[in-house]
Amino acid sequence: MKAQSILAILFFLNTCAIAQDSKPKIDSIFLVSTVESTSKMSLLSNEGCLHADQIAKDDIEKNKVKLLIVGGIAPKIYLNQNIFEEKYNLKYFDYGDVAPGSHCLLLYNKTMFDYLMTKYGKKWLREIRPDVYGLQEWKKEK
């Protein structure tokens, strides 16, 4: 409940800042708060997306690895996706149709893909859900 109260206060303060300034500013307080990383991602402005990489690194450090998905109005569940999650010690997180900015998602997931590559090699690429945000772009870069 405490984290929700902090989140509500910070959202209110950001809303006030938006009313005063056309470019919203999100402070790095979200990086040190107890709010879950998926909520932190939702609160980042486009300028704040640079912090998405740090949020991903924090999740890795806390052993709370996630792969972010934008599933739309009717999210999909793939057969055996839970086996992948258990094998690679991570969770898929589907924002549904209300997701953070695409640049934020891309930066977060790219950090996670790099982590998986370092830790597990290429094997995980044959088993991952194909709809994880940014996967195809990341593969082209590698």
Image (cartoon, grey):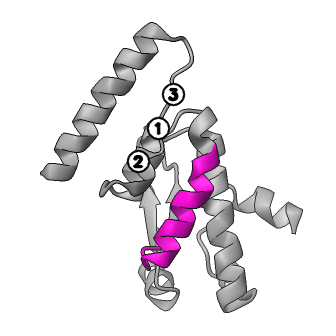
User: Within 10 angstroms of label 1, few (less than 14), some, or many (20 or more) residues?
Assistant: few
Question: Which kind of residue does numbered mark 1 sit on?
Answer: Asp
Q: Say which residue label 3 marks.
A: 25
Q: Say which residue label 1 marks.
A: 27
| N-terminal label among 2 and 3 | 3
Question: Which kind of residue does numbered mark 2 sit on?
Answer: Phe
Query: Do the residues bearing badges 3 and 1 touch, measured as CB atoms within 8 Å?
Result: yes
Q: Secondary structure at mark 3?
A: loop
Q: Which residues are magenta?
A: 50-65
User: Within 10 angstroms of label 2, few (less than 14), some, or many (20 or more) residues?
Assistant: many
**Horizontal placement of 95 versus 135: left or right?**
left
**Percent coordinates x, y for residue 120 in the rendering:** 67, 90
**Percent coordinates x, y for residue 91 in the rendering:** 43, 72
In this view of the protein, which residue sits in the foreground, 119 or 34? 34
State the CA–CA distance, disc 3 to disc 1.
6 Å
Q: Residue at x 79, y 56 (%)?
A: 137
In this view of the protein, which residue sits in the foreground, 39 or 85? 39
Task: Give me the disc on residue 54.
Answer: none
Query: Do the residues bearing badges 2 and 3 touch, measured as CB atoms within 8 Å?
Result: no
Q: Is residue 53 magenta?
A: yes
Q: Say which residue label 2 marks.
A: 30
Asked if residue 130 shows in the view, the reply is no
When asked about the image quadrant of residue 10, the answer is top left
